[in-house]
Amino acid sequence: YFGLFGGSGSSSGDWMGNLLSMSADYNSIRSGAYSKLLKAYYAKDSSSSTTKESRADKLRNQIKAEEADKTVAAAKSDADDLKKSAAALTTTGTKSLFKEKDIETKDEETGETVTTRGYDRKAIASAIKNFVKDYNDTIDSGADVDNTRILQKTLSMTQITNSNSKMLSKVGITIEKGNKLKVDEEKLNEADISTLKTLFNGAGSYAD
């Protein structure tokens, strides 16, 4: 007993003290004191875990908000580019791409410069291709945004395009997968200029 409770060199007083201490522990267990201590400990630990979880949720929400801001900014940037592309086509008056002008070309046989009156088809085709690229970029970024207003605007764009699909196909522009536009350059270069004007030039046109 001495070895168990206090070592072989312990006095009878020490032995009695250890026995009384164990008895007190036993009584504490019986009275529920230990149980209360354990509950208090785990309640504190649980509170700490909840705090950690709330901090993690806050961080996730912050990251989500930052990502949302980035997608909105990307959609706005693409939309601004599209507006510029559309403006380049819809402009009327002396700066219009669809205004007849003197076009200088080289005669393939003689090598001489020949001046003719007509439309700068290269400039028109280049502007339309820029418009199509910016349109496709805007469709992509607009669809990525978790914003009802922007999604509605993006949907509206696709609906307007679908309503003009037959006329667009006449100038070599088709609607592909994901509501993207695709240009057939050869067909575009040969397209009727009046059809191109209807689609891309002036107020009320498709580009406008």
Image: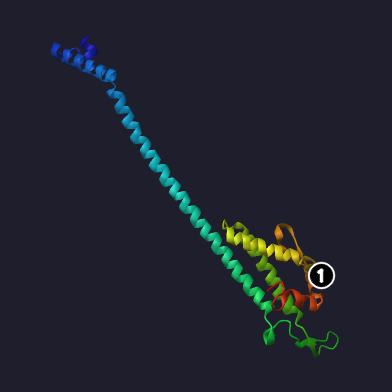
Q: Residue at x 46, y 53 (%)?
A: 62
Q: Position of residue 166 (x, y in %)?
A: 80, 66
Q: Position of residue 111 (x, y in %)?
A: 81, 88
Residue closest to the eye, 75 or 4:
75
The part of the image, by quadrant, that contains residue 159 is bottom right
Q: Quadrant of the N terminus?
A: top left
Q: SS for tag 1?
A: helix
Residue closest to the eye, 168 or 12:
168
The part of the image, by quadrant, that contains residue 109 is bottom right
Q: Position of residue 82 (x, y in %)?
A: 64, 70
**Residue at the disc numbered 1:** 170
* The furthest residue to the right: 109
- Asked whether residue 134 appears in the rendered view, the answer is yes
Q: Quadrant of the C terminus?
A: bottom right
* The furthest residue to the top: 1
Q: Residue at x 53, y 60 (%)?
A: 70
Colouring chosen for the image of the structure: rainbow
Q: Is residue 174 above or below residue 51?
A: below
Q: Amino acid at mark 1?
A: Lys
Tag 1: Cα neighbours inside 10 Å, few (<14), some, or many (≥20)?
Answer: some
Q: How many marks?
A: 1
Q: Is residue 142 above or below residue 38?
A: below
Q: Is residue 34 above or below residue 169?
A: above
Q: Position of residue 161 (x, y in %)?
A: 72, 65
Residue closest to the eye, 162 or 83:
162
- Asked whether residue 6 appears in the rendered view, the answer is no
Judge from the rendering whether residue 182 lies leftward or rightward of residue 15; answer left or right. Answer: right
Q: Residue at x 60, y 67 (%)?
A: 78
Judge from the rendering whether residue 114 lies leftward or rightward of residue 22; answer left or right. Answer: right
Q: Is residue 153 above or below residue 42?
A: below
